[in-house]
Image (cartoon, rainbow, N blue to C red):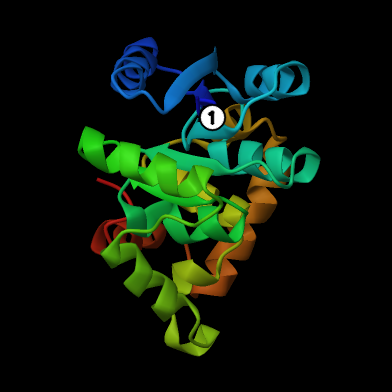
């Protein structure tokens, strides 16, 4: 009998975790070994429980999913991680893959697509959709051929999206567990890199490029 693939589900929404558990429970290949509702809890579980794969949400309250991903890959470099997000692929997928993710899926994907992605990632392969594969090909091009926001660091990009969504520097600092001074530095850097003058221009750019709704 083939051993089942043990999965850690890390998502801060109980309803989402329940739905994922139900999907995986209907498939004989998988077993949900543990659940976590934030990044810190996910790391604690990984240090205590043997799993074969992590299904990780991009947006969590205590620590951004990309940051959690980097911690996982630092401590458990061979552990496959499939990122799951409500954000479209163009927002975080390339960044997630560069940070070590084995794949990236939108939460609106069909259950059978999720099962296919998990099987592929568990076998040691990468999972990308056709549209994401095209984005990855474009990302290989020189910086001069890329949009200004694609040249930002992960923290700068997070700051950009949060400012554009109406968050204050204090609110961003609390969400990212940073000081207001550090967030101000990220804001100054991203404005300089993108050739923008203020939050108004930043928000206009973000809306124009679909970075916020």
Q: From where the camera sits, is residue 135 visible?
A: yes
Task: Determine whether 188 is above or below 196 in the image.
Answer: above
Residue lying at the far front of the rendered structure: 1
- Image position, residue 64 (x, y; %): 57, 36
Q: From where the camera sits, is residue 86 visible?
A: no
State the SS at label 1: helix
Q: Nearer the viewer, residue 156 or 125?
A: 125
- Image position, residue 39 (x, y; %): 62, 25
- Image position, residue 58 (x, y; %): 47, 38
Point out the image quarter for the C terminus: top left
Task: Determine whether 64 is above or below 40 in the image.
Answer: below
User: Is 200 left, or right, of 112 in this rendering?
Assistant: right
Which residue is drawn at the image coordinates 46% and 76% (left, top)? 139
Q: Nearer the viewer, residue 208 or 5?
A: 5
Which residue is drawn at the image coordinates 52% and 48% (left, top)? 123
- Residue named by callout 1: 171
Which residue is drawn at the image coordinates 48% and 86% (left, top)? 141
Q: Nearer the viewer, residue 183 or 32?
A: 32
User: Which of the 4 quarters of the picture holds residue 66?
Assistant: top right
Task: Determine whether 119 is above or below 48 in the image.
Answer: below
User: Which of the 4 quarters of the picture holds residue 65?
Assistant: top right
Which residue is drawn at the image coordinates 34% and 22% (left, top)? 20
- Image position, residue 4 (x, y; %): 50, 25
User: Is 49 left, or right, of 66 in this rendering?
Assistant: right
């Amino acid at each position: 009998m083939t051993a089942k693939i043990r999965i850690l589900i890390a998502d801060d929404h109980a309803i989402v975790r329940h739905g994922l558990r139900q999907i995986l429970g209907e498939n004989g290949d998988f077993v949900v070994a543990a659940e976590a509702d934030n990044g810190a809890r996910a790391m604690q579980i990984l240090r205590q429980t043997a799993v074969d794969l992590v299904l990780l949400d991009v947006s969590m309250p205590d620590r951004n999913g990309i940051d959690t991903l980097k911690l996982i890959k630092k401590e458990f470099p061979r552990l496959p991680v499939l990122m799951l997000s409500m954000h479209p692929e163009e927002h975080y997928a390339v960044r997630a893959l560069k940070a070590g993710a084995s794949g990236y899926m939108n939460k609106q994907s069909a259950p059978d697509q999720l099962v296919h992605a998990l099987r592929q990632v568990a076998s040691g392969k990468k999972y990308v959709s056709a549209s994401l594969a095209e984005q990855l090909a474009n990302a290989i091009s020189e910086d001069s051929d890329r949009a200004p926001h694609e040249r930002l660091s992960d923290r700068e990009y997070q700051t950009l999206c949060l400012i554009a969504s109406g968050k204050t520097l204090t609110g961003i600092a609390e969400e990212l567990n940073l000081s207001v001074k550090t967030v101000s530095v990220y804001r100054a850097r991203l404005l300089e890199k993108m050739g923008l003058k203020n939050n108004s221009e930043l928000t206009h750019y973000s809306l124009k490029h679909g970075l916020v709704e």
